[in-house]
Amino acid sequence: MGGPFVPDPMLSARHLQVRLGDRTVLRDIDLDFGPGWTAIVGPNGAGKSTLLRALAGLQPLEQGEVRLDRAPLADWPAPQRARRLAWLAQQGEAGGDLTVIDVVRLGRLPHLGLFGLARGRDEQAVRQAMQATGCTAWRHRRLAELSGGERQRVLLARALAVQSPVLLLDEPTTHLDPPHQVALVRQMARLAREENRTIVAVLHELSLALAADRLVVMAAGQIHAIGQPGDPLVQRTLVEVFGGAIRIEAVPVAAGTTEVQWVALPRL
């Protein structure tokens, strides 16, 4: 299933099909991603993380192609691709003996190479990423000393420090408490709208996903709906792929305003 027309997409997928063992986990996926924030949602086993890995060039394809800036992703030299596309894995890894600031500095490697010397703009990018994720106060602590939520914020800062136009995030809110989940959502919205970034995030928390500019609803390796969170078809499809276990409600943003935010509630 293809989505609405996206002019000048930064990232595209055409006829993607992926097999893992004897199972086809993605079937004929067509997607375009332009500037803005897209949330990929769906039940367990829908193929969301596999799709994100395919978009990042980390998942072998049985058929199809991913394009970055209209060029085949496979044709991009690794250093150039790393500057254009940053990735945060669902189970992000980094050496536990590294300090927080050194982990975030790894995000500048695509710009510096292994032996390049950091300059003022690199340190500024690191500081901005740490401020955005709230980990500046413990910049000299080792990663092994941090809680799961703190580690997640550091790994997110590393991805932000790349300052790439395309950012792929697999379950970025894992281990985060509600205040930091909200802070991350606001950060993704700001990057998309103020800096014209292309952000694609797989999200488990549906109410957070409903704050995105666009939803991609998946089930059983296929796309079932694409559109804005307020689109009735998208909302109906979202309820259907979760087997009717949720309902979508509009909640006023503030008293006396017509602006609403959409939330997913369990149907108990």
Image (cartoon, helix red, strand yellow):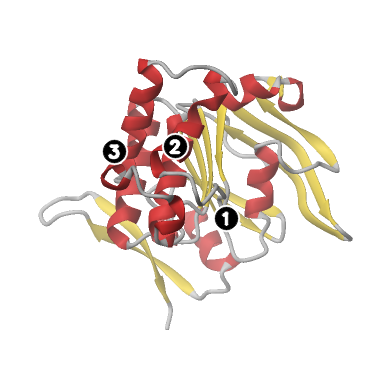
Residue 181 image offset from top left, x and y in percent: 35, 55
Residue 230 in view, yes or no: no
Residue at 62%, 19% in the rendered image = 80
Residue at 70%, 41% in the rendered image = 54
Quarter of the image for the N terminus: give it.
top right
- For label 3, the SS is helix
Name the one closer to the observer, 116 or 67. 116
Query: Can you identify the residue that label 3 sits on?
Result: 131
The type of residue carrying mark 3 is Gln
**Measured along the vertical axis of the image, is residue 62 above or below residue 128?**
below
**Measured along the vertical axis of the image, is residue 246 above or below residue 84?**
below
Q: How far is the residue under mark 1 from the one under mark 2? A: 19 Å
Which numbered dot is residue 91? 1
Near mark 3 (Cα within 10 A), the count class, few <14, some 14-19 or many ≥20, is few
- For label 2, the SS is helix
Q: Residue furthest right?
A: 22
Q: How far is the residue under mark 1 from the one under mark 3? A: 22 Å
Give whichever of discs 1 and 3 has the lower sequence position.
Answer: 1
Of labels 1 and 2, the one closer to you: 2
Total residue callouts:
3
Residue at 53%, 19% in the rendered image = 112
Near mark 2 (Cα within 10 A), the count class, few <14, some 14-19 or many ≥20, is some
Residue at 36%, 24% in the rendered image = 123
Give whichever of discs 1 and 2 has the lower sequence position.
Answer: 1
Residue 92 image offset from top left, x and y in percent: 55, 50
Residue 18 image offset from top left, x and y in percent: 80, 48
The type of residue carrying mark 1 is Gln
Query: Can you identify the residue that label 2 sits on?
Result: 102
Give whichever of discs 3 and 2 has the lower sequence position.
Answer: 2
- For label 1, the SS is loop
The type of residue carrying mark 2 is Asp
Q: Residue furthest front?
A: 97
